[in-house]
Image (tube, rainbow, N blue to C red):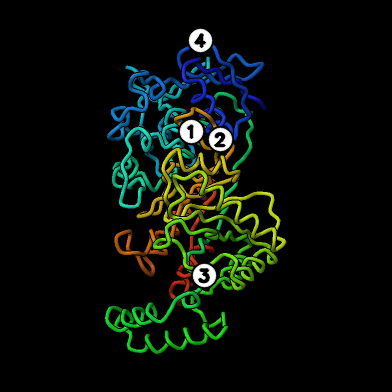
Amino acid sequence: MTFTVRIPPDREPERRYAVETFLGEIAGLDCEIVVEPRAGTRISLRGSDLALDLPDSFFAISEGRWLARESVPTAVAASYVPAHDGLAAPLVSPELPVLFDARAGESQFAGFDARGGVLRIDPLGTAFFLLSRYQEVAAPEFDAHGRYPIETDLAFRSGFHDRPIVDEYAEVVWVAVQRVWPGATRREPRFQLTATHDVDLPFQHKFTGPLRLLRSCAADWMLRRDALGPFRRVAQWSRTKRGDAHSDPANTFDLIMDLSERAGLVSEFNFITLHSVPHYDALYPLRHPWIAALARRMHERGHVVGLHASYGSYLDAAQTKREFDELRDFCRELGIEQSRWGGRQHWLRCRMPDTLQNWDDAGLDFDSTLGYEKRIGFRSGSCRPHRVFNLRTRRTLRLRERPLVAMDASLTDSGTMNLAGSAAADAMSRLVQRCRTVRGECVVLWHNSRLMTPADVDLYRGVLAS
């Protein structure tokens, strides 16, 4: 079943992206686009006189204000309860935040009659604003590591950073389509949990010297108040240095693969290939025999190898390509063949749209960097994979974003959510359930070095079982 979507001619690349990505990829509608002089967007169906109208609000921003800081809303415009209009969509909460109010003097956000229906919550504008990360380009702010800080994010300041509202909007649109055309069909989304693992510290001891060992022992004794810690650490360090990889506590890769396989999942392991800023990048050389053996074993067990682009690469297109080429050369030497390549930026360093344009130019197929470093949640408002749009070039990229929903450090570290035990487990369970509600892809990042205690393993096992 193919819907005709009629759009105005102004901002055609942006509108096409919104229709193809939001209505097509996320809402699951088969669409053909017609550009014609009109106000707002109209969805129709061949052979039917009915229509569903989506008025403009966001795309009506004047040319002089487009991508200007003042075009970014400072707060949610209103709230809307779709169920009050008979739109029983699967939502995280009955009340949906409205970013762009398209009522233009009308009292209701939705209305239906013999001619069809209208939705005045501006779903296309909202989806474009969040998926393109418009606010990060129009109102750039950076933390000490060059990242967009969550404290300035509209979703965080308005309290909906932990909701996949783009996907919720898609469900509201779909229910409205069914209201107008009861026999309508679409590609149904399906929930999926994806386990990813950035290999920052493959071995705690293998690539460290005596000085670092002494510092760690002092931390065991003075900070962690662990009297036996220094003796245990020295014993592990000694055995690892003598060639026993299994003695290294950070070598939890077989455990990770075991847990994934029992859950019916494929794990993705992202390796740093070149070091652009040694102080922040990993210590291991990619072609060390232990690293090569790890990658080979991951591939043999049916798991995936990806790129963990180095700390200094995020604004360097040439460096990004060098690192990806290095990964493919390394994998080719090991006999690792994959049809698709992706990964994530180290330290979640991502400057929109430059970093993702670099990934697209390098030939990568997908990225999974767009997540919060201090919270679990939905930085792009979605947990469904989607194409990337470059706001500066006004082009839809081949690269697909698979949004990062949760990282272990964001959940448990001081300075972030700082949760532990049942509180951490409950927070992750709620988040996974929200992805399940909209039948999205829940991409989680769990480092191998965060699975060195029974409590850590229990938390991660619970995530996989959520």
**Residues tagged 2 and 4 counted as in contact (Cβ below 8 A):** no
- SS of the residue under disc 1: strand
Amino acid type of the residue that numbered disc 1 sits on in the rendered structure = Asn
Circle 1 is placed at which residue position?
A: 390
Give the Cα separation between the discs numbered 3 and 4: 58 Å
Give the residue displayed 40% in from the left and 41% down from the top. 94
Circle nearer the viewer, 3 or 4: 3
Q: Where is residue 139 in the image (x, y as percent from the top left)?
A: 32, 35
Give the Cα separation between the discs numbered 2 and 1: 7 Å
Categorize mark 1 by other alpha carbons within 10 Å: few (<14), some (14-19), many (20+).
some
Of label 2 and label 4, which has the lower sequence position?
A: 4
Above or below, 126 relative to 196: above
Of label 3 and label 2, which has the lower sequence position?
A: 3
Amino acid type of the residue that numbered disc 3 sits on in the rendered structure = Pro
Give the residue displayed 66% in from the left and 16% down from the top. 47
Give the residue displayed 43% in from the left and 28% down from the top. 125
Above or below, 435 relative to 459: above
Circle 3 is placed at which residue position?
A: 202
Amino acid type of the residue that numbered disc 2 sits on in the rendered structure = Leu
Q: Position of residue 224 (x, y in %)?
A: 31, 79
Res 423 visible? yes
146 lies left or right of 292: left
Circle 4 is placed at which residue position?
A: 37
Q: Nearer the viewer, residue 18 or 148?
A: 148
Give the Cα separation between the discs numbered 1 and 3: 34 Å
Amino acid type of the residue that numbered disc 4 sits on in the rendered structure = Pro
Circle 2 is placed at which residue position?
A: 397
- SS of the residue under disc 2: strand
Of label 1 and label 3, which has the lower sequence position?
A: 3
Location of residue 98 (image quadrant): top left
**Residues tagged 2 and 1 counted as in contact (Cβ below 8 A):** yes
